[in-house]
């Protein structure tokens, strides 16, 4: 009965005109930035975080969530028609989707991608409804020691699942933790690493760092890359899949939903990891693996379903434990903190309108996305012809205005520009900035829980080992490190990321 009451509350929150409008705005922006190569949800959400300051918390999270899972839909359009993924999670869709478009079957590929994403998103949201409250109840039993160990596990998983060199991923995580130390110490009121600047007494603004690393740096990276766009076809017809397409796609859609839902929950996972894993699974299970890469409809159905399912279930650890499982969820933590909401299991009880409103909005948003992606495909095709050089001035302007509007501070804009330069350098050095962002978000929370746990235990550090949940989380983090250091697992990891 409680579940029914909570769902009713969620629908009451979502079905107001204002929240329906913000949900629609979110999925439209998400589809748009998914369609346009060079613009992704991380950069877009980072740029829009200041805008959400004046919104109600539930409206802000509903809109930002719509941008994230909306980008998974839009990314398939450019991947299929351009052979250029609009989103990282749509990289593998290029392999078979573009080949289908070249053979005149772009409509079928787009239809399967949209309907598969709809099914995966709705099914994953159902899982959130069923399991998130129970997980939040377990989370209420967590004390400072358990939270510290949980965040250690999250950072270790982010390192293990980061692309490229493990050493670089560790360095990025440590750098993020160090940046999180900047600002006034809560216990002593001493400003650490402030360099005499009063603007740094409150620490480095989360929005400032994210805008620089993922906004300004991406602009520079996209401007230095060669831009070549050739639309496979401008005449997209027969969007509804045939019976043969349904038969071939039904099993991959179900497997993609299950695999994506699982990988979305794991720390360090997300839509990109789910789509790659789903493609690999479909290719291995197929009786004719040689068809993959030459226009297999299963190579579109599985990954596109998986990435949207993972995008939805990524909200489970965020809403129930306050643990961001990927960079977008780290930005969501920032959005909640901007509104004075501490992420964690207490959100379900203290902010039920935010908790259930966000969950229910995913069903409504997925329905909106199907309506947007199928009938309006002609509009998205025309948008694909817009050169990036015409887009970046507006992106840069809105980013600078958003950063300035937070504290009316020119220093924040200069800091964002500095982090943009740092992000550009990291891209050149092939260092993934995502672990840095997770370290920056989790670092202050880790320090707070570490101090609190030691204070309650009167300085006894064994408190992290004597509590069963804390010990289990630390052992799991250690097991992940041991596995990834082993030569066999390391070689498999390198091959997987190369593919």
Image (cartoon, helix red, strand yellow):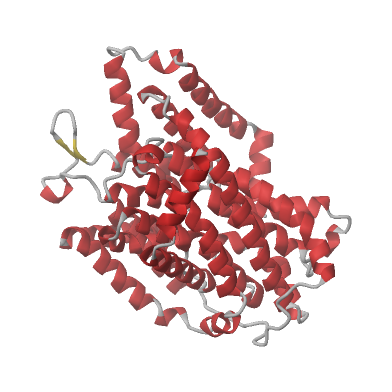
Nearest the eye: 443 or 164: 443
Residue located at (40% from left, 29% from top) = 147
Horizontal arrangement in the rendering, residue 209 relative to residue 321 (left or right) = left
In which quadrant is the C terminus drawn?
bottom right
Nearest the eye: 258 or 327: 258
Q: Quadrant of residue 119?
A: bottom right
Up the image or down, 276 lies above or below 368; here it is above
Residue 489: % across, % down: 66, 36
Horizontal arrangement in the rendering, residue 442 relative to residue 198 (left or right) = right
Residue located at (70% from left, 73% from top) = 98
Considering every residue shown, the one lying at the far front of the view is 1
Up the image or down, 1 lies above or below 163; here it is above
What is the number of callouts on the image?
A: 0
Residue 415: % across, % down: 24, 57
Up the image or down, 263 lies above or below 488; here it is below
| Residue 433 in view, yes or no | no
Residue 9: % across, % down: 43, 50
Residue located at (36% from left, 59% from top) = 59
Considering every residue shown, the one lying at the far bottom of the view is 235
Residue 433: % across, % down: 43, 51
């Amino acid at each position: 009965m409680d579940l029914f009451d909570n769902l009713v509350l969620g629908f009451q929150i979502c079905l107001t005109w204002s929240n329906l409008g913000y949900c629609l705005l979110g999925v439209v922006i998400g589809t748009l930035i998914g369609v346009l190569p060079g613009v992704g949800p991380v950069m877009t959400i980072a740029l829009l975080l200041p805008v959400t300051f004046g919104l109600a918390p539930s409206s802000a999270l509903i809109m930002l969530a719509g941008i994230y899972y909306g980008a998974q839909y839009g990314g398939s359009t450019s991947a299929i028609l351009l052979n250029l993924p609009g989103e990282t999670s749509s990289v593998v869709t290029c392999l078979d989707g573009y080949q289908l478009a070249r053979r005149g079957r772009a409509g079928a590929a787009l239809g399967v991608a949209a309907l598969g994403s709809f099914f995966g998103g709705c099914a994953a949201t159902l899982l959130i409804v069923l399991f998130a409250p129970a997980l939040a109840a377990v989370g209420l039993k967590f004390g400072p020691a358990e939270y510290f160990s949980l965040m250690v596990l999250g950072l270790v998983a982010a390192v293990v699942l980061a692309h490229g060199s493990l050493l670089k991923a560790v360095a990025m995580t440590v750098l993020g933790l160090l940046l999180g130390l900047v600002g006034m110490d809560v216990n002593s009121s001493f400003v650490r690493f402030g360099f005499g600047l009063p603007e740094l007494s409150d620490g480095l603004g989360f929005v400032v760092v994210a805008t620089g690393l993922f906004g300004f740096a991406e602009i520079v990276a996209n401007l230095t890359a060669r831009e070549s766009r050739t639309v496979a076809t401008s005449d997209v017809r027969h969007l509804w899949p045939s019976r043969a397409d349904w038969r071939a796609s039904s099993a991959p859609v179900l497997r993609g939903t299950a695999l994506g839902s699982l990988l979305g929950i794991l720390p360090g996972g997300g839509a990109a990891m789910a789509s790659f894993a789903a493609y690999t699974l479909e290719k291995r299970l197929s009786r004719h693996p040689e068809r993959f890469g030459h226009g297999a409809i299963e190579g579109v159905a599985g990954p596109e379903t998986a990435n949207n399912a993972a995008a939805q279930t990524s909200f489970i650890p965020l809403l129930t434990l306050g643990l961001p499982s990927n960079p977008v969820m780290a930005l969501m933590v920032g959005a909640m903190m901007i509104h004075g909401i501490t992420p964690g299991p207490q959100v379900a009880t203290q902010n039920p309108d935010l908790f259930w409103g966000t969950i229910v909005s995913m069903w409504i948003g997925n329905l909106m996305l199907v309506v947007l992606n199928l009938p309006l495909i002609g509009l998205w095709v025309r948008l694909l012809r817009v050169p990036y050089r015409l887009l970046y001035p507006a992106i840069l302007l809105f980013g600078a205005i958003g950063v300035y509007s937070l504290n009316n501070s020119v220093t924040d804009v200069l800091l964002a520009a500095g982090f943009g330069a740092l992000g550009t350098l990291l891209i050149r050095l092939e260092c993934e900035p995502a672990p840095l962002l997770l370290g920056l978000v989790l670092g202050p929370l880790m320090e707070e829980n570490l101090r609190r746990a030691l204070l309650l235990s009167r300085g006894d550090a064994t408190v992290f080992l004597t509590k069963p949940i804390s010990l289990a989380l630390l052992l799991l983090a250690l097991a992940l490190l041991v596995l990834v250091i082993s030569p066999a697992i390391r070689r498999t990891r390198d091959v997987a990321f190369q593919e």
